[in-house]
Amino acid sequence: MALRSAPSRPAPAGRARRTVADEDRPDSLWDMESSLRRRGFEVVAGADEAGRGACAGPLVAAACVLPSGRRGRVPGLADSKLLTPAARERVYEEVVDRALAWSVVAIPVGELDARGMHVTNIEALRRAVSALDPSPDYVLTDGFPVPGLARPGLAVWKGDRVAACVAAASVLAKVTRDRIMLELHERWPEYDFAGHKGYITDVHSAALERHGPCPEHRMRFVNVARARDAHAARVVHLTGTGGMVDDEAMSLAPSSPALAPAPGELR
């Protein structure tokens, strides 16, 4: 599990001090954090993940605390899915520069297959939040609650479109995962991970059926397991021997008591 984080740091000298007008500026993406700060929760973190529905590559979770006032108003910030790749890169750099604290956790495919998607996803979000310094007073998560945070929090439906700190976390997670997928493309270009980083596509499905899965594919996913078995059967048919297939290495990991599988994930 990889972890990247940035500690808290003061705003650069010369920045305008926070004012009521800055904090209460009518912009809905920042409304929830402003409301929480008025209630005494000064350090508000957002957490989100990228790659939950993908059939290959790591799951990446991120957490972020944005400063209040003008410095926290990240130019161009939005749900990462609504931004172009170039815009996401620009916003990523702004978030890293402006954030009071941020962290990113990457969960490798082997752990996802061994433990199940939902269980591992919750753990990744929990670890990302726990790595923040300063520790948040309140945590906003995208879509579903994250137990075990030892601090109050709220699961927000479409949180990456409602709360700035969650949107910032979504950008951190998405850009990090996309960069990882570009690296994987260099190792396995036949799957075109550079062009198909997220959800399964027709092109990726065709490559998966043609070549079978690589070590970065998630064996718990139905389409991956089906492609694995079909590819193994073709190898046996063409060679006339089962010695070409490592059944143990290709077998499904033991099922874990996942609460809710990702789309296409085997229980």
Image (spheres, rainbow, N blue to C red):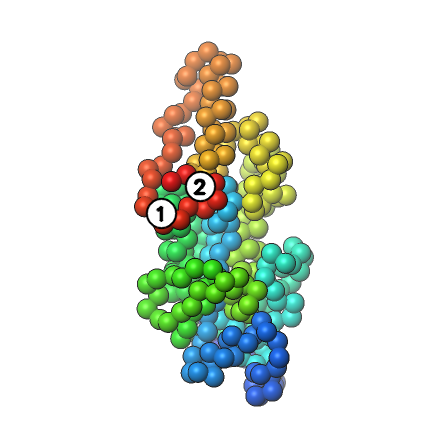
Residue furthest to the front: 157
**Quarter of the view holding residue 129:** bottom left
**Which residue was labeled with disc 2?**
265
Residue 53 spot, x, y in % from top left: 50, 47
Q: Is residue 263 left or right of residue 25?
A: left
Asked whether residue 184 is in view, the answer is: yes
Q: Earlier in the sequence, mark 1 or mark 2?
A: 1
Q: Which residue is mark 1?
A: 258
Q: Amino acid at mark 2?
A: Glu
Q: Quadrant of residue 75?
A: bottom right
> Spatial distance from mark 1 to mark 2, Cα to Cα?
10 Å
- Judge by depth and name the residue closer to the eye, 113 or 38: 38
Q: State the residue in front, 213 or 28.
A: 28
Residue placed most toward the observer, 150 or 155: 155
Where is 261 relative to 19, above or below?
above
Q: Assign a secondary structure to mark 2.
A: loop
